[in-house]
Image (tube, rainbow, N blue to C red):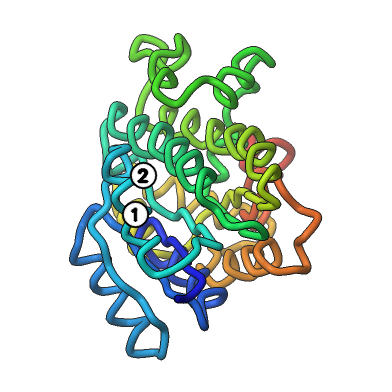
Amino acid sequence: MKNVMILAGAGQIGMAIARRMGYRMKIVVGDKKPENAQAVARTMNEAGFDVTPVEMDLSSRSSIQNFIAEAQKYGNITMLVNAAGVSPSQAPVEAILKVDLYGTAVLLEEVGRVIAPGGVGVTISSQSGHRMKQLTPEEDAQLACTPTENLLKLPLLQPENIRDTLHAYQLAKRCNEKRVMAESVKWGTKGARINAISPGIIVTPLAIDEFNGARGEFYKNMFAKCPAGRPGTADEVANVAELLMSEKGAFITGADFLIDGGATASYFYGPLKP
């Protein structure tokens, strides 16, 4: 039996973190598209890792439970990397809320039930959650603490209160951040930790879709006018994940780390200010 890492989402950021942290472990990678999970497993297995692909739909609790049960066949779950999700250009409002908001909340909850003592998790949120208007303390508390099956019934998540897919995505990512805070309290009772990372523009196939989509010029302008002057790489996100998931991060839990080359700073106080 080995210690097991659950990797949700077979994308570049998740794979970069798994390669950094997953040596000597069993890695079970889940993705809604089995061919994506299989591609990541093949790439990593050919590099000496031990990876098994699984079909997993983040919008379905039963699919998440099956994913976890599959992982438990190999040993104790000691790491979670959640890099699954859909972007504003890829999906309608309903799907963004069901996958990125509800699905992430369910995954954190379900893994929290079985995470081994000393275990650690990281979930990939987004700079988008930092750039919407502030919610009220009551709304933040609702996103943090509402039972998962009631989340999508919250007034602020009803269709009439959501302007477009970007707004839905911002709300989902704000929820991720608040949910990590609330879950960290529960994980802490098991001696486990959970944190969020909010990347800015990171060059991945998903981001390239965005560059070539309706908001492509918006994104190119964003990284041109951020202090870093460029988009980031998945490995730079993995640098922070490595800190958070290693012993060096042992005092860090319930936190969210913004890694956006200063784009949010520029949005509030620089040339990206709307």
Find residue 46 and report its image quarter. Answer: bottom left
Q: Which residue is pictured at 62% across the width and 59% down the height?
A: 119
Q: Is residue 186 left or right of residue 214?
A: right
Q: Which mark is residue 87?
A: 2
Which residue carries the number 1 mark? 69
From this viewpoint, is residue 254 visible?
no
Residue at mark 2 to residue at mark 1: CA–CA distance: 28 Å
Q: Nearer the viewer, residue 161 or 76?
A: 76
Q: Is residue 211 above or below residue 274?
A: below
Q: Which residue is pictured at 18% across the width and 66% down the height?
A: 35
Kind of element beneath mark 1: helix
Q: Percent x, y for residue 182?
A: 64, 33
Q: Is residue 182 above or below residue 207?
A: above
Kind of element beneath mark 2: loop
Count of marks placed on residues: 2
Between discs 2 and 1, the one toward the N terminus: 1
Tell me if mark 1 has few (under 14), some (14-19) or many (20+) residues whose alpha carbon lies within 10 angstroms of its own.
few
Which circle, 2 or 1, is nearer the viewer?
1
User: Mark 1: which amino acid?
Assistant: Ala
